[in-house]
Image (spheres, helix red, strand yellow):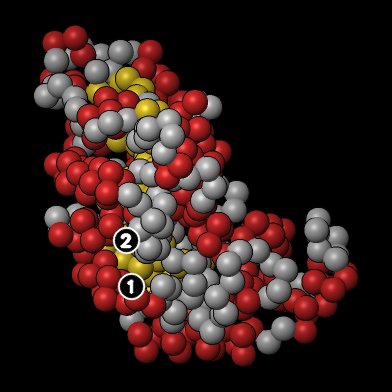
Amino acid sequence: MKANELIYGLALSKIPGVGAKLGKQLIAYCGGVEAVFRESKRILLRIPNIGEQLAEEIKSADPNQLAEPDLQYCADNGIKITFCLDDDYPIRFKHIADGPLLIYSKGDYNPHHLRTVAIVGTRKPSPYGQQICEQLVDDLKPYNVQIISGLAYGIDALAHKTACRNDIPNLAVMGTGMDVIYPAAHKNLSMDVMANGALISEYPTNMRTDWENFPRRNRLIAAMADVVVVVQSAKKGGSLITAEFGNQYFKDVFAFPGRINDKASSGCNDLIKQHKAHLMDSVNDIAYIMRWELEASAGLDKQATLFVDLNDEEQIIVDLLKKNEQATLDWLHHEAKFTLSQLASLLLSLEFKGVVRPLPGKQFSLT
């Protein structure tokens, strides 16, 4: 992003009432983030959901003054800011309407990891919950995944700790700005996460801790994941919110069942009963549903596909799938540089030709 675009993007995110959806709507209507602040009040008022007060807030805003605190803090503390129009903005966020305007990250953040698993659950897990969480993360290591959680007490922290112990890349999605580690007791854990991955936030610095931010944080956890696993949860809790977002975003949601009289697992049992989550008892269930265990075929090297005529664009897709035995739609979109409509058409054509097969979780592999 150009320096001035970053200033205007930061400033837009700081205006009260401008959230992710409305911010991107403003940018689209005005033709750019800088143009939002250049536009006349009369034109701003023509944009849906922009009232008199918000239009006045935008016109009276000083972008440099709004952006300066975050720019300085991030520069001083090695924090990267990614804007929604940047090339390295996560593909998975582009597919949700309320993907964040800005992402703050610190550490080694790979936004395009091929396989991502969110692990969430209660803040007060039982010994059973602790055991299955640690076992799950241990067993995920051979699958080359990126673990995502929320740095909270309980299952979140245990998922991060176990991932770090196994040298599994993991991301902690925060409900605060990057200048506040919450809970404070997890400061050392946050350092371990950054050594094995990154801290991620959509919130600016110098912002008070607002409990409303944590449910919104959970939507990012779900959006970043291919798989959402609820390890243990009562009937109410943030992990159920994450699972709900996972279903809204068409992610594969899994839950470990508990005893029928165990309140700590009643939320997981409800998810399974309501067909909002796959029942799981081991990582093998994820591997089966997501087809992460595939036959060792090389796709087009098979006799059945040797003589299929492919155009240049189809060949690009096939070559990418040769590099990865299975790939998500997001990854193919990022690597091939086709529009989503072009990519969908090419994949359908390849499926009809018997070269590509679709898999659960919006993934594809060679036949």
Q: Position of residue 201 (x, y in %)?
A: 45, 67
**Res. 253 in view:** no
Categorize mark 1 by other alpha carbons within 10 Å: few (<14), some (14-19), many (20+). some
Ranked by sequence position, the earlier of labels 1 and 2 is 2
Q: Position of residue 288 (x, y in %)?
A: 27, 25
Residue wearing tag 1: 186
Categorize mark 2 by other alpha carbons within 10 Å: few (<14), some (14-19), many (20+). many
Q: In terms of image quadrants, where is residue 4?
A: bottom right
Residue wearing tag 2: 157
Kind of residue indicated by mark 2: Ala
SS for callout 2: helix
Above or below, comparing residue 93 to residue 210 in the picture: above
What residue is rendered at 88% in x and 71% in y?
52
What residue is rendered at 72% in x and 83% in y?
61
**Res. 285 in view:** yes
> Mark 1 touching mark 2, by CB under 8 A?
yes
Q: In terms of image quadrants, where is residue 67?
A: bottom right
| Nearer to us in this view, 3 or 235 | 235
Kind of residue indicated by mark 1: His
Quadrant in the picture for the C terminus: top left
User: Is 247 left, or right, of 304 in this rendering?
Assistant: right
Q: Position of residue 226 (x, y in %)?
A: 38, 41
Q: CA distance from mark 1 to mark 2?
A: 8 Å
What residue is rendered at 48% in x and 75% in y?
177
Q: Position of residue 141 (x, y in %)?
A: 16, 46
